[in-house]
Image: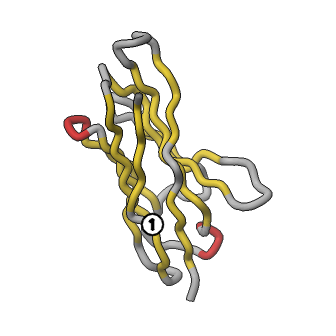
Amino acid sequence: QVQLVESGGGLVQPGGSLRLSCAASGIIVSINRMGWYRQAPVKQRELVATISSGGITNYADSVKGRFTISRENGKNTVYLQMNSLKPEDTDVYYCNAGVITPSSWRVADYWGQGTQVTVSS
């Protein structure tokens, strides 16, 4: 089994910064794309940022220029550096990864449990 565990969420004031981490564990052959998504109550989960195994990134327009996604492949870990945070960034943030395991040798989608980010004064 593959598990994604997020950390780094919390309460921050508007304009502040926060860094989210997500570590994948389990029997893993490789991890393709990793990303961050967020979901507020009564809303659908939306893409925040993704990064490919080759380091190609894409961002939601709402976070472009403020958030930076990165990864450390040796640790199977993806990060989201969030700067200039706004109240509207308040959400539960979920880590996502496309993982190849020995049991399937095909890419499967995995999700973390979510970490709360609250931006408030």
Q: Which residue is mark 1?
A: 9
Determine the image quadrant of residue 62: bottom right
Q: Nearer the viewer, residue 90 or 110?
A: 110
Kindly identify the residue that appears in the image at 32 percent across and 37 percent down.
Answer: 25
The x, y position of residue 84, in whole percent, is: 47, 73
Residue 113 x, y percent position in the rendering: 52, 50
**Among the 4 quarters of the image, the one containing residue 104:** top left
Q: In the depicted view, which residue is nearer to us: 89 or 7?
A: 7
The crowding category of the residue bearing disc 1, from other C-alpha atoms within 10 Å (few below 14, some 14 to 19, many at least 20), is some
The outermost residue toward the right is 42
**Residue 112 in the figure: left or right of residue 103:** right
Residue 108: x and y in percent read 50, 22
Residue 32, position in %: x, y? 39, 26
Q: Quadrant of the C terminus?
A: bottom right
At x 45%, y 12%, the residue is 106
Can you name the residue that lies furthest to the bottom here?
121
Q: How is the image coloured?
A: secondary structure
Relative height, residue 62 to residue 51 (above, below): below
- For label 1, the SS is loop
**Which residue corresponds to the image point at 41% horizontal and 25% vertical from the top-left?**
99
Q: Is residue 82 left or right of residue 61?
A: left
In the foreground, 49 or 1: 1
Task: Please name the amino acid that badge 1 sits on.
Answer: Gly
Position of the N terminus by quadrant: top left
